[in-house]
Image (spheres, grey):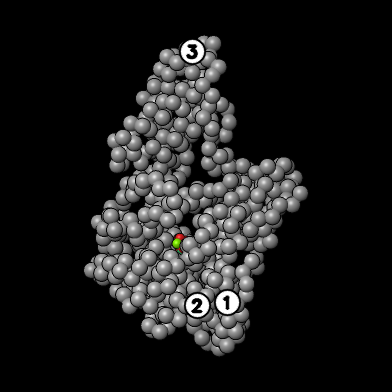
Amino acid sequence: MQLSGVGVSPGRAAGPRVLVAVGLPEPAAGPAPDDVEAEAGKIGPAAAEVAALLSDRARSATGEARAVLETTALMAGDPALVTTAERLVRERSLPSPRAVWDAAAEFSEALSASGGYLAERVRDIADVRDRIVAALLGVDPPGIPELTSPSVLVARDLAPADTAGLDPDLVLALVTEEGGPTSHTAILARALGIPAVVACAGVLALDGPGLAVDGDSGTVVASDGTVRAVARTPRATWDGIGRLADGHRVKLLANVGSAADARAAAEAGAEGIGLFRTEFCFLSAPEEPTEARQREAYGAVLEPFAGKPVVVRTLDAGSDKPLAFLAMGTEPNPALGVRGLRIAFDRPDVLDRQLAAIAGAAEATGVELSVMAPMVATAAEAAWFAARARAAGVPRVGVMIEIPAAALCAKEILAEVDFVSLGTNDLAQYLFAADRQLGAVAELNAPDQPALLRLVGSVAEAAEGAGKPAGICGEAAASPALAPVLAGLGVTSLSMNAVALAQVGAALRAVDLATCREAAAKAKELVGG
Ligand code: PEP
Ligand code: MG
């Protein structure tokens, strides 16, 4: 049987299927064990096994991943959790998995009540709890299992931190039942060059030892599990300068989130960095990194672009990218809540420390710095951010246009800042009221929707009127088919993951501005699907 999803990262691969286990359900409170002492005695060894495995993994990890694994290992080895669970087995005659579950709940409640840093540890407790319960039940713990041979990963969806840790040598392809073309799972899969299909309904239930995945057509079929060579889209040739056939310039820049991304982007010939997602450096940091630590992390990313233009985005935390150290409360609609720049209104000190670290890293690496804010809704917000960034010594200040209100007020916003960058991933999500991570509404988030293109065109027009640049750094910029349309709409740069640069560069080189303008006019008129 062939399943269809949305191909979000090109290439084909086949291999054994490895399921990413979903969260464990609450274990049953019965039947009561025959021998409570023997039942209680199972908990210590299970916790020790989990702690040893996590310590092992920490030793072979680096950076934040290592820090997180070390913390989790310590927690798994904490005797307090084990003794509480043992007590619950004895006092309430609970089976050991349920006793661990309830003991973890007691700990979590106590931590939540103490607030701040300790409250953030609740998610680690849940992770440790699931691992110990899984060990007691003899099932796989949730999350990405440790791969020892090349495999095709299948998941309901993946957290950005999970995807960021994937090893492209071991992950042949990635298929998720949920997720959309602009979800961070899709973006990171592309950045890592792993063929991927998202929004593939039914894939979790597909029988067979293996899967064959086509990241171009979005199809997935059951296979015998044999590993077949990955077919990647042949690389187009491009000379490293973004321009049309008639010489009209459209700068081709890179989206990066780590030093490895930046090195890959520099090797692929990016003219600069159009979007540095700084939150990706600290997805699992338990505490706000110090200014010095931030300076070091940003410097490592900026270094390959010495002497070149770079756009650093201040933290875009919240919604699909929660940051542990910002202790975000729960919100009914996180995508519409306190995220991006909105967090800085409450915590300007965090923004100021970040701006200082960015300015320091830029000076140390000799890049041509611009800084922009995410999730700006009004001209007043743009002015607030610009004042703070200028006070920190940032020479060029911009904002992202990713909220329809900001697109409609582009002229007023451009009066406050030096440039704008269109975040078409969120702009589409908010314009169509369609969750960018939800497979069921993936079509509405397609970057060629006429309503989205009309909005992009109006922002580009406002920027031209103001004599300031308007680039695109959403995933729309990574489509070779759409690039001429975007150039025709008047955008001045396209920023994308390194893997897309050559193909987009080659597509632009094949057309002149008049052809692009015609294509843009046509694309704006088509009736969306
Ligand atoms: C966007 O929304 O288009 C964007 C580039 O930002 P992010 O994907 O990080 O939300
Ligand atoms: Mg965004």
Label drawn at residue 524: 1
- Amino acid on which disc 1 is placed: Lys
Give the CA distance from mark 2 to mark 3: 70 Å
Question: What is the x, y in percent for residue 522?
Answer: 61, 80
Q: For the residue marked with disc 2, what is the amino acid?
A: Gly
Residue for point 41% across, 17% down: 87
Residue at x 34% of width, y 60% of height: 341
What residue is disc 2 on? 457
Instruction: Name the residue nearer the viewer: 526 or 437.
Output: 526
Q: Percent from the top left, x then y, of residue 334?
A: 43, 51
Q: Return the mark for residue 270.
A: none
Query: What residue sits right under mark 3 in the picture?
Result: 36
94 relative to 7, above or below: above
Q: Is residue 425 visible?
A: no
Front residue (pair 261, 197): 197
Q: From mark 2 to mark 1, how far is it between C-alphas?
A: 9 Å
Q: Position of residue 123 (x, y in %)?
A: 41, 39
Residue 68 image-quadrant placement = top left
Element assignment for label 1: helix
Residue in front for this viewpoint, 501 or 433: 433
Are circles 2 and 1 on residues that touch, CB within 8 Å? yes
* Lateral position of residue 242 relative to residue 350, left or right: right
The mark nearer the N terminus, 1 or 3, is: 3
